[in-house]
Amino acid sequence: MKKKLLLCVLGLALLAPLVGCNTVNGFGRDLQKVGEKIEDSTKKK
């Protein structure tokens, strides 16, 4: 039961950014921003 709920929540979390951007180009920019944030957080440590 918990696994199904977790999979549903994870699936929705992964689909939300795709719905938020209307183009592949927009998705690329969003993905780049996420990568930059991750990169910045690793540099601070």
Image (cartoon, rainbow, N blue to C red):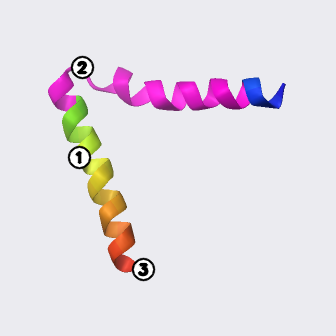
Q: Residue at x 24, y 19 (%)?
A: 22
Disc number lying in front (2 or 1): 1
Query: Which residue position holds label 1?
Result: 32
Callout 3: helix, strand or loop?
loop
Query: What's the magenta region?
Result: 5-26
Whichever of callouts 3 and 1 sits on the residue coming sooner in the sequence is: 1
Residues at marks 3 and 1 touching, judged by CB atoms closer than 8 Å: no
User: Which part of the image, by quadrant, shows the C terminus?
Assistant: bottom left
Q: Residue at x 36, y 59 (%)?
A: 38
Residues at marks 2 and 1 touching, judged by CB atoms closer than 8 Å: no
What amino acid is at disc 3? Lys
Task: Measure how far apart labels 3 and 1 are at the Cα level.
Answer: 21 Å
Q: Quadrant of residue 19?
A: top left
Residue occupying the far front of the picture:
3
Residue occupying the far bottom of the picture:
45
Query: Which residue position holds label 2?
Result: 22
